[in-house]
Image (cartoon, rainbow, N blue to C red):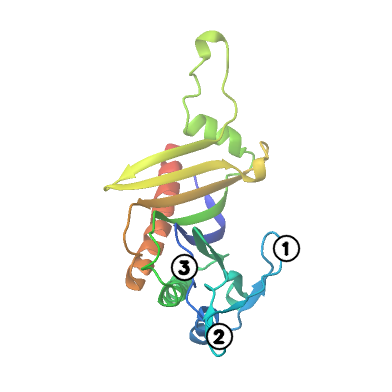
Amino acid sequence: MRIVREDVLNVSLVLSGVQLLNKADAKVAFTRQVATEVSDAPSPSGSINISFTAQLGGEGSTHPLPPEPVGILHLNRERIRLDCFPGRSSIIKEYPQREEMDRLAEVVGIAFEQTDFDSQHIQAYGVNIDATYKLPTGMAASNFIANHLHMPNLFLDQGIEVVSGMSTLRLNHRGQRWNIRIEPRLGDLETDKLFIGLNRHTDNVSLPPRPGEITLLLNEVWDQMEAIVGSLEGRA
């Protein structure tokens, strides 16, 4: 049975415990280095950030306060968004093509260059991919999950038939932790579209992955998604 990929919705890198672009003038330097238009988005609360300079020690003595959180930035032409907040940051590429992973890794590397990691501790980071797939005509995604990812006769001795489902799994593969979510697209039990979200999770790291490693991580997650779909096809 052929499961057809419709869209890769997004690929992202999420860092816990870190605010990206926390250096002074980081936004200006980042914009110059990425060499494309970068636009701001309002903060989630809708508040306006105002920067102050504290005057201490008399005339001519200024001590700037720590830089304000950059917030959300968009590289509109490339459909890349950066969420840069204290304690958690992410870089997200929407509707990516496989050949765009090098550019996404480049943007991540530039963001790392404009981030002070000495004053922050990365608690964990995750590389994620979300995609949608179309099942053969007439097959509901919820029925497919119930019959191919679960034991459909689990409650048969009680006269109960499993007819639909969704699945969240934690996997170990080559010493790495993976999380996978498989469910009907948009929660529609009758749809023939399958949503699959995959996360490669890494805990307790002292440094961010090097820019060259980012490309490998992004491609590894993409490859793993294709391997998982291949396994689902083999079970159908």
**Alpha carbon separation for disc pair 1 and 3:** 35 Å
Image position of 55 (left or right of 230): right
Q: Find residue 191 and report its horizontal and vertical position in percent.
A: 66, 42
Residue at the spot of label 3: 98
Image position of 118 (left or right of 181): left
Query: Of the residues shown, which amino acid type is indicated by label 2?
Result: Gly
Q: Find residue 144 and report its horizontal and vertical position in percent.
A: 55, 35
Query: Of the residues shown, which amino acid type is indicated by label 1?
Result: Gly
Query: Of the residues shown, which amino acid type is indicated by label 3?
Result: Arg
Q: Circle 3: is it few (<14), some (14-19), or many (20+) Cα within 10 Å?
A: few
- SS type, badge 2: loop
Q: How many marks?
A: 3
**Alpha carbon separation for disc pair 1 and 2:** 36 Å
- SS type, badge 3: helix
Residue at the spot of label 1: 46
Residue at the spot of label 2: 58
Residue plotted at (51% across, 62% down):
90
**Mark nearer the viewer, 1 or 2:** 2
| For marks 1 and 2 on the same chain, the one whose residue lies earlier in the sequence | 1
**Mark nearer the viewer, 1 or 3:** 1
Residue plotted at (52% across, 13% down):
156
Residue 160: name its quadrant. Answer: top right
Q: Is 6 rendered above or below residue 66?
A: above
Q: Is 228 rendered above or below residue 60?
A: above
Q: Residue extending furthest left? A: 174
Residue plotted at (36% across, 59% down):
220
